[in-house]
Image (cartoon, helix red, strand yellow):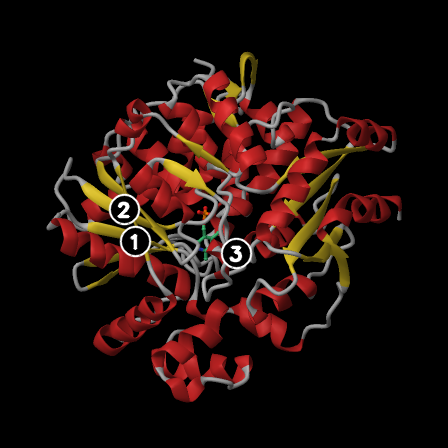
Amino acid sequence: MELLYKSTRNADKTVTASEAILKGLADDGGLFVPMSIPTLDVPMDTLKEMSYQEVAYEVMSRFLTDFTEEELKHCINSAYDSKFDTEEIAPLAKVDDTYYLELFHGSTIAFKDMALSILPYLLTTSAKKNHVTKEIVILTATSGDTGKAALAGFAEVEGTSIIVFYPKNGVSRVQELQMVTQKGYNTSVVAIHGNFDDAQTGVKQIFEDKAFAVELAEQGYQFSSANSINIGRLVPQVVYYVYAYAKLLQQGEIADGEEINVVVPTGNFGNILAAYYAKQMGVPIGKLVCASNENKVLFDFFTTGTYDRKREFVLTSSPSMDILVSSNLERLIYLIAGCDAQKNETLMTALKEEGVYSITEEMKAQLESFESGYATEAMIDESIKEVFDKAGYVLDTHTSVADVVCKQYKANTGDERKCVIASTASPYKFVESVMSAIDSKYDDVDAFELVDELNKVSGVKIPDAIEEIREANILHTAECDADKMKEIVKQILSK
Ligand SMILES: *Cc1c(COP(=O)(O)O)cnc(C)c1O
């Protein structure tokens, strides 16, 4: 049966999965959502014997029903190949009684690779299916990791070009170097004078600018998005939650049907929403624990029912979570509003115009599977040190946020269900913060010296992604003010 998609802000119009992937954002500014979340009608007993690629097919084929088996398998097998440094693709590491689902084994060493290595294939397949002849321009705002993963995915992909905007002083040294050294005739990287929210707002405004779209269409271009607002990013992320459960079962860590909790370090609410979709599909997930850094807008939302972005934006050691407007939360709001597009739109308009909205008690009652917590900078450092000292296992700063919140949750509730923590980045990517947390003698030491030191103390091989940028030339130096993004896009596309 065909599964169609709707915008969270329009009750009438439906599109196919491939149309939703092509467009990225709906014309009305809403996000595409499946009209229902499909049931995972394959037994865990079968899934547990499958490879990552096979599980990916079982999950994704339930969502992307207008892709043929051949098309989808081609996308999956092209994405999850030797670009990943392990055949397991997303291995589980057990430390004490906690399972870290390592989502950073792709080419840019953050979890964004899990979806962005397949998105270019989903998008070019969608373009073919819909007879699109224009060049697809991928506009992306990044808090640090999406940018590089999208650049790596789309570099030299025929019929596409990609423009990435990142906050000039809001990313780690390694993140910035990874982006500005990106090769490929169709890649552009621009630093903006502003934070991630400014970049994301700028991109959304360009998407909503109908006159600009017409102008560009005349020149042979159409926009799409590699941000997690694209359903083509969300669906591949559901896969690893199903896979993790199946592997725990296979390894005898859990019994069939036993509930597990999932803790996710959260920024734009994409990763944890994927876990929620997995739960809705039927994976025995108990609680979904949303972990924030000091930009704790989501923690406040889950505890009070009020989303309030009017607060100071804090630059933290987990920059990929430095976000005050969590785009994907809109998909959850839509669901708990009873899939009422009108109700959702009213709240989103309030957020845009007044910076705040509150949900009703009735809506709040539907958030019972969610728990939340947050970690301060000091707690993040402490947790990195503690896990390293105890087990020799090195967490990155983002994963450490989840680790802190996981421990808080267990202590506060006594919930003894097993916990899977989404481990979203390699510690090498945030080596300065990580090494300083382990020992203050590493403060002010050069990032690449620290890379060698991290290798020594952890025994974890230095990823190719790091070796590549040691010597690479800087190829992108463009900068602009946040309100000049449209002009820059025009300039880039007129070259
Ligand atoms: C993007 C990112 C996150 C946040 O994920 P969301 O889907 O935006 O909630 C967490 N950690 C790392 C390392 C990331 O790159």
Mark sitting earlier along the chain (1/2): 2
How many residues crowd mark 1 within 10 Å: few (<14), some (14–19), many (20+)?
many
Secondary structure of residue under mark 2: strand
Residue 385: give x, y in percent of width and height: 30, 75
Secondary structure of residue under mark 1: strand
Question: Residue at label 3?
Answer: 83
How many residues crowd mark 3 within 10 Å: few (<14), some (14–19), many (20+)?
some
Give the quadrant of residue 453: bottom left
Q: Of 468 and 299, which appears nearest the observer?
A: 299
Q: Give the answer, above or below, for where 16 lies relative to 24.
A: above
- Residue 303 visible from this viewpoint: yes
Residue 468: give x, y in percent of width and height: 61, 71
Secondary structure of residue under mark 3: loop
Residue 421 got which mark? 1
Residue 464: give x, y in percent of width and height: 54, 69
Of tags 2 and 3, the one toward the viewer is 2
Give the quadrant of residue 136: top right
Of tags 3 and 1, the one toward the viewer is 1
Looking at the image, residue 437 sits to the left or right of residue 352; the answer is left
Query: Does the beta carbon at disc 3 come under 8 Å from ligand 1?
Result: no
How many residues crowd mark 2 within 10 Å: few (<14), some (14–19), many (20+)?
many
Mark sitting earlier along the chain (2/3): 3
Q: What residue is rendered at 69% in x and 34% in y?
A: 207
Residue 262 got which mark? 2
Marks 1 & 2, CB-CB < 8 Å contact? yes
Q: Of 139 and 342, which appears nearest the observer?
A: 342
